[in-house]
Image: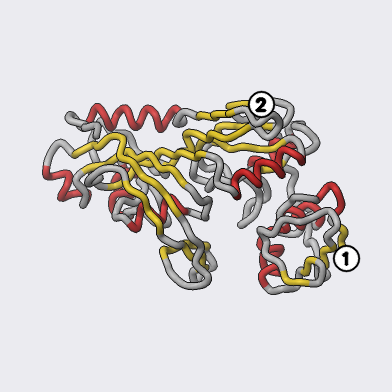
């Protein structure tokens, strides 16, 4: 039986177990939680359950085959930092934490770089999503920010480049989402109904449309062009923006799970136009996070620019599409 104590109060169960069960892969941690072998105060628990300092966690006997490799120290572009918070501009292709075959991610490498003794993720971004990632440097800040996110007080805005020319203006999507595993064990999400589906709400607004300059490209790619879209999410479900956009017929460019495979392959090969560089990146970026500071309740607005390479690619797209239109 493991006492949670003050150091674990407010942590998610999976993060608590990853900390105390050194060397145990996260995939195994999630497996024993799902199977009911992990108990919190004698009851089954979810991996996302928040723990109290007085909780007692029972775990089955586990064996570590070997110690995980130490995370390399790494610094990231800082968006904001004070005594309570650290916000970075996360690069695409970097996981926020270890797991799913990865030994470490942003949180582990920041700790290895000598960041504050307490450092925890306030929220998560998909591995291939770039942009604003917020971390707490104090337990009190983490607890306050989690409460704010649960109450949906934060304003989270993303930019996505999608396949197709967006028809109409802004719209709101209220479609429940269901997480499942494929036959190969890959995690996926789909629009669904039923008791196991989670409510999910997103708002989308077209920012700029990029029609192809000739009909031949439409026949070649299967779409009339691309559209830059702003997304605002009111719930933080796994892959929410990607699945909601796919359900509307506008998948995110470069998305390997929910995207338009034929178009993605052409972009990755650089087959669209000589002036448009190759791109295999998923074009989803966490551009803005507005919330109240957990210490003094003052408004705090965090913004991050597109990665330089993506910004250049978008400019080349504007140059290539001779008549980009703004709604």
Q: Position of residue 15 (x, y in %)?
A: 72, 53
Judged from the image, the secondary structure of the residue bearing numbered disc 1 is loop
Q: Pinpoint residue 253: horizontal percent, then vertical percent.
A: 35, 46
Measured along the vertical axis of the image, is residue 190 above or below residue 204? below
Horizontal arrangement in the rendering, residue 264 relative to residue 17 (left or right): left
**Between 269 and 104, which is closer to the camera in this rendering?**
104
37 relative to 322 in the view: left or right: right
Question: Is the N terminus in the top left, top right, bottom left or bottom right quadrant?
Answer: bottom right
Image: 234 above or below 287: below
Give whichever of 77, 144 is nearer the camera: 144
Give how far apart the Cα atoms at labels 1 and 2 are: 37 Å
Element carrying mark 2: strand
- Residue that mark 1 sits on: 1
Q: Which mark is residue 149?
A: none
The residue shown at (69%, 41%) is 144
Camera sees residue 86 = no
Q: Which mark is residue 81?
A: 2
Q: Residue at x 24, y 32 (%)?
A: 326
């Amino acid at each position: 039986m493991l006492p949670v104590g003050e150091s674990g109060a407010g942590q998610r169960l999976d993060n608590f177990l990853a900390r105390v069960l050194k060397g145990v892969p996260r995939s195994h941690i999630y497996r024993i939680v799902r199977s009911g072998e992990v108990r919190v105060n004698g009851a089954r628990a979810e991996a996302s359950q928040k723990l109290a300092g007085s909780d007692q966690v029972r775990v089955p006997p586990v064996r570590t085959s070997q110690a995980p490799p130490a995370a390399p120290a790494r610094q990231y572009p800082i968006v904001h930092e004070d005594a309570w918070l650290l916000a970075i501009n996360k690069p695409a292709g970097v996981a926020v934490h270890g797991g799913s075959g990865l030994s470490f991610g942003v949180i582990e490498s920041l700790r290895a770089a000598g960041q504050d003794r307490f450092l925890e993720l306030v929220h998560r971004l998909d591995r291939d999503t770039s942009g604003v990632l917020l971390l707490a440097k104090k337990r009190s800040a983490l607890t306050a920010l989690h409460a704010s996110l649960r109450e949906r007080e934060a304003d989270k805005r993303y930019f996505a480049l999608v396949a197709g020319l967006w028809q109409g203006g802004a719209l709101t999507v209220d479609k429940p989402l269901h997480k499942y595993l494929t036959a190969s064990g890959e995690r996926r999400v789909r629009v669904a109904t039923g008791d196991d589906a989670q409510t999910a709400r997103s708002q989308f607004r077209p920012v700029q449309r990029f029609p192809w300059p000739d009909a031949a490209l439409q026949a070649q790619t299967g779409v009339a062009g691309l559209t830059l879209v702003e997304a605002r999410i009111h719930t933080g479900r796994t892959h929410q923006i990607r699945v909601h956009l796919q359900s509307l017929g506008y998948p995110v460019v470069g998305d390997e799970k929910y995207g338009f495979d034929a178009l993605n392959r052409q972009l990755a090969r650089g087959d669209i136009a000589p002036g448009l560089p190759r791109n295999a990146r998923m074009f989803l970026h966490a551009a803005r996070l507005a919330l109240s500071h957990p210490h003094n309740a003052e408004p705090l607005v965090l913004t991050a620019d597109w990665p330089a390479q993506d910004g250049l690619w978008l400019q080349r797209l504007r140059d290539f599409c001779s008549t980009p239109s703004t709604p």
